[in-house]
Amino acid sequence: MIQNMRMDTRKAQYNNFQELYLYCYYVAGTVGLMTVPIMGIAEESVIPVQSVYDAALYLGVGNQLTNILRDVGEE
């Protein structure tokens, strides 16, 4: 997340999806990852822990991409 704050001071435009994905990872993917230990994983869960973290990461990235697309439509 701190890396994203540094990126925001140096870069405002991304040339390809890889760069955009990295931005989304730092902005929101890290938030998703940080929420897993806070919210916890049910003891009776049969889903592997790595899958839970992967889902949290992808949800964060997906939400950020959605926010970007929404902003493009408004501007």
Image: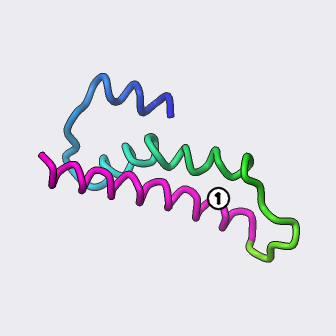
Q: Position of residue 9 (x, y in %)?
A: 31, 22
Image side of residue 24 versus residue 37, left or right: left
Q: Quadrant of residue 5?
A: top left
Task: Sort mark 1 into few (<14), some (14-19) or many (20+) by Cα contacts within 10 Å.
Answer: some
Disc 1 marks a residue whose amino acid type is Tyr
Question: Looking at the image, which residue sits at the far front?
Answer: 74
Range drawn in magenta: 48-75
Q: For the point 58% across and 64% down, which residue is it?
A: 55
Image side of residue 37 versus residue 35, left or right: right
* Residue under label 1: 53
Q: For the point 58% across and 58% down, which residue is it?
A: 56
Q: For the point 54% across and 44% down, which residue is it?
A: 30
Q: For the point 64% across and 58% down, which residue is it?
A: 53
Q: Secondary structure at mark 1?
A: helix
Question: Looking at the image, which residue sits at the far left?
Answer: 75
Q: Compare residues 14 and 65 and report the one nearer the observer.
A: 65
Quadrant location of the C terminus?
A: top left
Image side of residue 62 versus residue 50, left or right: left
Question: Looking at the image, which residue sits at the far right?
Answer: 43
Q: Is residue 59 magenta?
A: yes
Q: Position of residue 38 (x, y in %)?
A: 73, 46
In the image, is residue 15 above or below residue 17? above
Which color scheme did the rendering employ for the protein?
rainbow
Q: Main secondary structure of the magenta part?
A: helix
